[in-house]
Image: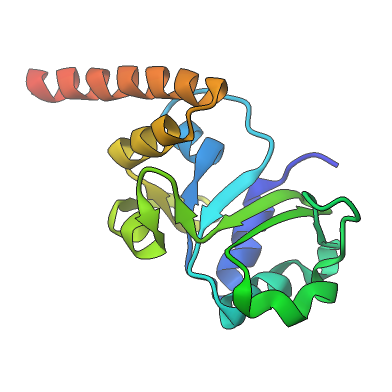
Amino acid sequence: MPQNDQALLMRLKDGGLEFVVIGGVCVVYHGVPVATFDLDICCPFGEANVRRIESAVKDLNPVHRLTANRLPLEQTRSSFASLKNLYLQTDLGKLDCLSEVAGIGNYQEVLKQSISHSMSFGEFRMLNLDALIAAKSAAGREKDLEAVRLLRAVKERKTQQKELF
C-alpha cells in the first residue's frame, strides 16, 4: 500500500497527539524534492501519548515493523510506559514516532526549534531549517548527508533572497 502521510497526520492530530514533523516529509516541506517512504514525527512519550498513537491507528492494523515477529501494537500495551520510539507499519504506510532527535534533543527541544505550517488539511509543526540540517547531519547516513547538502543550498538561496529585499 502506498504511503499516505496526509491521512496519518490528520489521524494523529485528530487524536490529540502533540508532535513535530521531522525527517523526509520535513525535508520536502523546506523545498528539497526527495523520495520519502515513511512519516517521521517526534512526540512526548509515556503511556498516555502512546495510547493516543494507538487510538489514531488502531483500525489500520498497526504492527511493530522493526521486530522479527511484527507484533501488533495492542499486544505490547504492557510496555507502553517504557517505550522511547515506535516504528509502525500501518495500512496507510510507515509511521516512526521518536521521543528525541539526534542533533537536537528531546521533544521539548525539538518543539522549540519547530515552526507552524498550514496545509490544506490542517496546521502542523515542522522542524525549522537549521534544526533539520542539524538532525540530518547527526544522523550521518548517506541519504541524510545528501539532504543536508541540498538543505544548505536552500538556506543559502533564502539568505540571498533576503539580502535582495
**Residue 73 percent across, percent down from the top left:** 80, 68
- Please indicate, yes or no, whether residue 51 appears anywhere in the rendered image: no
The type of colouring in the image is: rainbow
For the point 24% across and 19% down, which residue is it?
156
Quarter of the picture containing the N terminus is top right
**Left or right position of 132 against 18:** left
- Number of labels in the image equals 0
**Residue 146 percent across, percent down from the top left:** 48, 18
Q: Quadrant of residue 2?
A: top right
**Residue 37 percent across, percent down from the top left:** 69, 36
113 or 33, which lies in front? 113
101 or 160, which lies in front? 101
The residue at the far right in this view is: 69
For the point 23% across and 24% down, which residue is it?
158
Quarter of the picture containing the C terminus is top left
**Left or right position of 162 against 94:** left
For the point 59% across and 71% down, which residue is it?
14
Q: Quadrant of residue 80?
A: bottom right
74 or 31, which lies in front? 74
- Please indicate, yes or no, whether residue 102 appears anywhere in the rendered image: yes
123 or 106, which lies in front? 106
For the point 35% across and 59% down, which residue is it?
111
**Residue 125 percent across, percent down from the top left:** 41, 55
**Left or right position of 126 against 9:** left
